[in-house]
Amino acid sequence: MNAKTADKIATGVIYAISGIVALILISMLAFILIRGVPHLSWHFLTSPARAFEAGGGIGIQLFNSFYLLILAMLISFPIALGAAIYLNEYAKKGRFTSIVRTAIEILSSLPSVVVGLFGFLIFVVQFGFGFSILSGAIALTIFNLPLLTRSIETSLAQIPNLQREAGSALGLSRWETVIHVILPAAVPSIVTGVVLSAGRVFGEAAALIYTAGQSAPALNFADWNPFNISSPLNPMRPAETLAVHIWKINSEGIMPDLNAVSAGASAVLIIVVLLFNFSARKIGAKLYKKLTSA
Amino acid sequence: MDKITQKLMQKSESTKKDSLGRAISLAALSLIVIVVISIFTFVMSRGLSTFFHDGVHVKDFLLGSTWNPSVINPQTKQPYIGALPMILGSFIVTFLAAIVATPFAIGTSLFMTEIAQKRGAKIMQPIIELLVGIPSVVYGVIGLTVIVPFIRQIFGGSGFGILSGTIVLFVMILPTITSMTVDTLKSVPRHYRESALAIGATRWQMIYKVVLRAATPGILTAIVFGMARAFGEALAVQMVIGNAALMPHDLTSPASTLTSVLTMGIGNTVMGSLQNDVLWTLAMILLLMSLVFNLVVRAIGRKGELK
Amino acid sequence: MSKSHRGTIVTTVVAVAVVAALGTAYATREKGSSGTSITAVGSTALQPFVEAAGEEYAKTNLGTFINVQGGGTGTGLSQVSQGAVDLGNSDVFAEEKDGIDAKKLVDHQVAVVGIAPLLNKNIGITDLSIKQLQAVFTGKVTNWNQVGGKNQKIVIINRAAGSGTRATFEKFGLKGAQSIEAQEQDSSGMVRSIVATTPGAISYTAFGYIDKTVVAASVDHIAPTNKNVAAGKYPIWSYEHIYTNGKPKPAVAKFLKYLTSEEIQSTLVPKLGYISIHDMRVIRQVDGEITVK
């Protein structure tokens, strides 16, 4: 076979492979959306789930997912930001830094089910938090920290050193340079990173089944006092999220309209995750424009 | 001493702030390290108590092929705690998924970097990013409603098994491997390609003999990362593999992985009992394996640097 | 400098506002409801029952909140014996779980669940003896023609090891014999659809899941019906237990009494495919000994 034919064949194969990959994604999305979207209705999105009767919704699960997401982000963002600032701005090459980097790498490659079991052992059982939003939020934080830290660090590293030198030249301390010069410049890519990681956290289930629990007790949406037990804001109540709900009804569900609920819930989950993905890019680009033009 | 010297001798306000900021960010960083250390300590101490507290032999655990911790073997007076079926199951699905995914990942990333950069950036880039974002339970649902019935139709049996698990994992790790391979290919210096083309190589010769060779360490790293993800994936696999703690003897009969046994069993056992301890030992194996994957990545990186 | 001062002021104001809001919230919380919150943890099979009953109960007993969590029988029993929760839901007697000090726990039986062998329709068998069940599940026979069916390979589908359904089936359906290792499924609905579509498949499930797509085989010529279970004729059934650590608190005792009331036992219990505890004409002890009421 001469080189030209080989070249043509190889090009053809590469085209075919890429085509197949594109086809896989499109057919998966189409499958989930076509199967699920017909089941979506206001009632489905807002009413509580029914364990053994038809006609239940995913309202509480949807709320739990967002609440857990917000709490997890509130805890993990400052920690990740601090860690990233230290790694990128203060850390010198040395033993400590390399140990820390290894630790973060290991944490990021830990299976999320192990993170969930650790949360179960420490927060649910030892600390006595029970299956609760609090335990779940901490597990999600552990799951989210390494990736968020790395993404913020990359954002900071992209800011040219010229900016730091300019800061020093103006007599600013390193901390002031970071706060007033580097961080504002890095905001667009940090925001993109945060929203992308929010999408991942939203779809996570394995870290939650033994921490936030697998039950979603009825909530009183008129009561926003976090100290009341049926309040949606109470952090000590068990909270099944949308992703956990999908897993649970598929592996041990007993309601008669299981397939419809599973299809609808999967469609909602996909739509939300896609929204996160798209908005991450949109918001990042917009912020960049705004901050650079000003 | 006059005021000015005193002021000059003291730390300025911004220095104070600087050390405060430094301390805060260092504290955040240390927190992450503490979390990692405590995960290791707690999971290891639970996992090891199978051997120290319950007196199980490591050999019986790793090489035994019967898993039924609540039943005592009448001959040895020991419960059946052979974890080999799950360990094998995990490794087989991981390797198979990586073997299937690698050509697809390399092909797609070549398309994106060498063949059609424009379309690659416009169409394939978002597709790969979307695939990364799809939650694992959704992969599980698709596996359960499409792949399992499909396998059942073609091969008979129940459709649950290693083959279904492999297919689901293949799609899950494909974007991971692809996006990392794309990064490596992009980092191959432009003059490599130009010199290959200048001496009369066709595009494929340039890709095969120069670009891929130069990118090999990076591609290997990408594959190992993909395998690490496949090894630790829990719910999607558990939904399609069939969960039989049996030695896997063919691809379409039900099998199990470390993660699937863990998620199904941990709630049914009592903390501190042998049945519970052996599950923590499985979790410990998962933990150690992710450490091994990390070491492999480092070893590859170091070798790649030398060349 | 003034900019950073403004930042400090804003931060302080926000912090004060948050603390004040939390303070007011804490001061105005419904003390009644936080006083009588009952937490139940355990069996995922029992979870929907206690949850549904708890919601009904809360309607008539305002201010009481029943918090039901899954987590599995093992978690439920260990949590209740540590005193971490009020109720531990379990599919088995606490004495049957390793690592549990059953003497401390008080058993409250709230329902009975019957379990039937489930067969694929094409096997051509509608009745199996206990001996035959044993032979099938321990792998002594591997083809249905050895027990009077068609020439068809036997495919066993088990429930998760440690699950209540499996424990009950092995104890009473197989007379304590252990099933060989086979495929495991956690979901009853999934088990039914696999049995319906897989030639030669056999499994077992609670009565509530039997439908026309599968054959629910008689055991020793006794049909798996609620009536036969209640009369003590059909052998494969178990209690659904709720355990308390020692004697329950008055609020908890009231809820437990509500669970066994005629109101719940005649409505919710049959709806979930369980058998009412009041219909039972026999009592079974931990060791399996049956006495007539």
Image (cartoon, coloured by chain):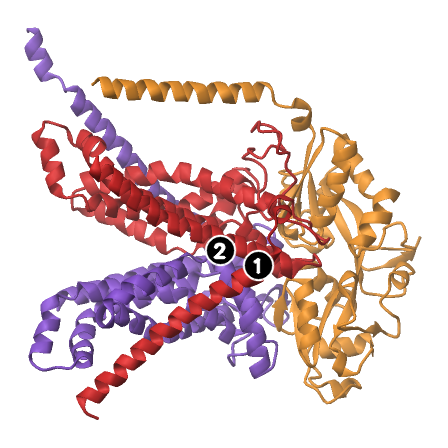
Query: In which quadrant of the rendered view does residue A292 lie?
Result: top left
User: Can you give x and y, in whole percent of width and height, for residue B129 in the image?
Assistant: 36, 59
Q: Which residue is mark 2?
A: A270
In the image, residue C17 sits, relative to residue B199, either above or below, namely above
Q: Which chain is orange?
A: C
Mark-to-mark CA distance, 1 and 2? 10 Å
Q: Relative to the observer, which residue lies in front, B239 or B255? A: B239
Residue plotted at (35% across, 44% down): A194
User: Can you give x and y, in whole percent of width and height, for residue B121 in the image?
Assistant: 28, 62
For the residues tagged 1 and 2, is the chain the same?
yes
Q: Pointer 2 indicates a residue of which chain?
A: A
Residues marked 1 and 2 touching at CB (< 8 Å): yes
Secondary structure at badge 2 equals helix
Q: Which residue is mark 1?
A: A36
Left or right, B35 with reference to C107: left
Q: Name the quarter where the N terminus of chain A is drawn.
A: bottom left
Q: Which chain is purple?
A: B
Q: Residue furthest front?
A: A293
In the image, residue C58 sits, relative to residue C105, either above or below, namely above
Query: In which quadrant of the rendered view does residue C64 lie?
Result: top right
Q: Of the residues under marks 1 and 2, which one precedes in the sequence?
A: 1
User: Can you give x and y, in whole percent of width and height, for residue B111 in the image?
Assistant: 27, 71
The three-letter amino acid code for the residue at tag 2 is Ile
Picture colour for chain A:
red
Q: Relative to the observer, which residue lies in front, A212 or A62? A: A62
Residue plotted at (54% across, 37% down): A129
